[in-house]
């Protein structure tokens, strides 16, 4: 009898925040991640996002957490100050410009006012989420690899 071998995967990342509504607005409304669960009452606050079998989870902290005040180093751009965790979120090319415009209009802290061609392979736009985490929004498109035009 063959036993099915378990594949090793990261399934969940747990993050904590000061304001679950702000996190929800950023990741659901501005960025467009797929929200699978949300709760915000006196006892609990959470929002969960699904991404290809992976869940990115946010929980409201019971105590005030410090908000990061500097950009994390990332290989895709120059200028990060700190060796901190950060992440990149891939979006469809068709949605990229609208997401960038929503982020600009939101008042979020931006690394630059315009998307950048990065590592000769993709368009990226870096922003801070409400907890000060560095978040890169990007898309890759083979057609763009030779033109450097969005």
Image (cartoon, rainbow, N blue to C red):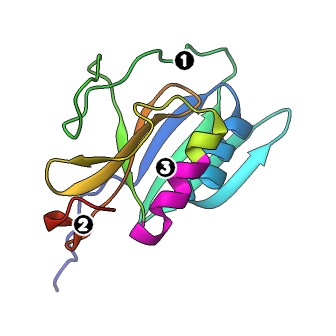
Q: Specify few, some or many for label 2: CA neighbours under 10 Å numbering under 14, 14-19, or 20 or more.
A: few
CA distance for labels 2 and 3: 21 Å
Instruction: Pick the residue in front: 6 or 100.
Output: 100
Callout 2 secondary element: loop
- The region drawn magenta spans 92-102
Residue tagged by mark 3?
56
Asked which quadrant contains residue 40, the reply is top right
In the picture, residue 58 is in which quadrant? top right
What residue is shown with label 1?
67
Left or right, 34 with respect to 89, comes to: right
SS for callout 1: loop
Judged by depth in the image, the label closer to the viewer, 2 or 3, is 3
Q: CA distance from mark 3 to mark 1?
A: 19 Å
Which disc number belongs to residue 78? Answer: none
Quadrant of the rendering where the C terminus is positioned? bottom left
Q: Is residue 82 magenta?
A: no
Residue that protrudes farthest toward the bottom in the picture? 1
Q: Is residue 27 visible?
A: no
Image x and y of residue 10, in percent:
33, 52
Q: Residues within 10 Å of mark 3 (few under 14, many from 20)?
A: some
Residue 24 in the image: above or below residue 111: below
Residue 65 percent coordinates (x, y): 59, 16
Q: Which mark is residue 6?
A: 2
Task: Give whichever of discs 3 and 1 has the lower sequence position.
Answer: 3
Above or below for 118 versus 79:
below
Image coordinates for residue 113, horizontal then vertical, percent: 45, 37
């Amino acid at each position: 009898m063959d036993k099915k071998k378990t594949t090793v995967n990261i399934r969940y990342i747990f993050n904590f925040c000061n304001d679950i509504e702000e996190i929800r607005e950023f990741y659901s409304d501005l960025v467009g991640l797929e929200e699978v669960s949300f709760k915000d009452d006196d006892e609990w606050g959470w929002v969960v996002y699904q991404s290809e079998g992976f869940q990115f989870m946010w929980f409201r902290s019971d105590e005030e957490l410090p908000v990061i005040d500097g950009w994390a180093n990332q290989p895709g751009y120059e200028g990060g100050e700190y060796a901190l965790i950060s992440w990149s979120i891939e979006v469809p090319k068709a949605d990229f410009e609208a997401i960038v415009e929503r982020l600009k209009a939101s008042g979020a802290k931006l690394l630059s006012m315009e998307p950048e061609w990065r590592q000769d392979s993709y368009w990226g736009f870096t922003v801070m989420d409400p907890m000060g985490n560095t978040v890169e929004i990007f898309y890759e498109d083979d057609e763009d690899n030779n033109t450097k035009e969005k």
